[in-house]
Image: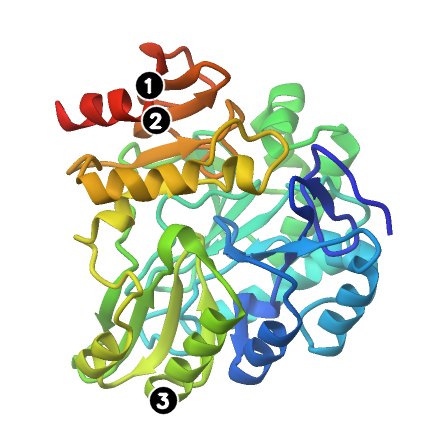
Amino acid sequence: MASVKGWCPNLYAPMDTGDGVLLRVKPFGGRLSVAQARALAAIAPGAIELTNRANLQLRGASAESAPALAQALVAAGLADADPGREARRNLIAPPLLGDDPTIPAGALGWRDALAGVLDSAGTLPGKFGLVLEAGGVLPLAGVEGDITLRLAADGTAWLRLQEAPWQARGATPGQVATLVEAFRASGAKRMRGAVERLGAAALFAAAGLVPEATASAAPAVPEVLGFHPYPGGARGGFGLMPEFGVLDGAGLLALADLAERFGDGTLRLTPWRAVLLGGVTQPAALAAEAAGWVTDPADPRRRIIACPGSEGCASGLAPVRRDARALLAQGAVPARGLLHLSGCAKGCAHPAPAAAVLVAGRDGYALLRQAHAGDTPLRSGLTLAEAAAELENE
């Protein structure tokens, strides 16, 4: 098993970092049973990170130990034994699918069909992925795949290509498979590249689909934390997250215990670096037992994103999570929007723009507003104290 730098890692192609190699774990269906969570807690070599792809990342393994770790994860039912299939399993579906009664009945079949499309496809770029959006109490608003399939309440399937302002009505799994093959033939790394090369109209036509204009207003991104009642209010999903979306084996064991005691025995991963427990009927008792976890949307820890920085990444130029805790202690986190602390200009922890961004450099932090980590900064060379003062003066 070779480790790779600058790669979108998976279980069989780990990425070199400053603390060993990084492996990505993609639980089937985006969920872990209590038994799987406990098995993973027992074998995880270090930190366990929740990702914005509804996956897990394992830190602390070595290039020598990674193959045995991969075998153990396959044995736990958390990965495919075939490296090619495992690399292609990039699918985000509604986390509460199978528990939320407001999700259309056909969504489960669509999830399995899309998984089958990826399973049978040829080689795909590491970041290529599909998204199934099907409403419910926590819709996947703001989550976009190379191909996004939106299932309406009446069962109609609407298909959208990455960053293209059109959608097509009445898509079938076969047409999704045709689009995947058209993408592969284009040689692009992401669907947006195929759209630029071939045009969206040609790609839709290749699959026998007729594009229509999409709605101009994007739906609001939902708040995942806390209790999300289903109709009637007696039962629902409950979202919680560890600080910075990072936990250790003991934290995963604690989550498994909460899922067993208060939920349906399943941990459901989300693209918001949080975990959902389904089948919850005692939300107040669960919240009390989850003290220390972030469960309140008003918690300032909810508004800060920080990568490992120099303590866990060779590219990091500052211990940004330690600095993030210092900013939290000072109350220097903006009251609105996200604060993104990045150890370098790549901004891996949050590729999207943030209200405020601090990027570590060799001469201190650079400050940006409403920007990506790699954009031109407003100020640079700031000490942490100076950066905190800038944030407090908002």
State if disc 3 and disc 1 touch (CB < 8 Å).
Answer: no
Where residue 31 appears, as percent x and y from the top left, is 52, 71
Element under label 2? Answer: strand
N-term-proximal mark, 1 vs 3: 3
Q: The disc labelled 1 sits on which kind of residue?
A: Leu
* Numbered circle sitting on residue 239: none
Q: Which residue is mark 3?
A: 261
Q: Is residue 368 left or right of residue 61?
A: left
For disc 1, the neighbor class at 10 Å (few under 14, some 14 to 19, many from 20) is many
Relative horizontal placement of residue 68, taking residue 168 as reference (left or right): right
- Find disc 2 in the rendering and name its residue: 357
Spot occupied by residue 360 in the image (x, y as percentages of width and height): 45, 24
Q: Nearer the viewer, residue 153 or 345?
A: 345
Q: Residue furthest bottom?
A: 261
Q: Which residue occupies the extreme right position in the image?
A: 1
Q: Position of residue 274 (x, y in %)?
A: 39, 59
Q: Determine the secondary structure under disc 1.
A: strand
Q: Are marks 2 and 1 in contact (CB under 8 Å)?
A: yes
Callout 3 amino acid: Arg
- Residue visible at 41% across and 18% down in the picture: 364
Quarter where residue 112 is shown: bottom right
> Where does label 1 land, which residue?
367
All told, the count of numbered labels is: 3
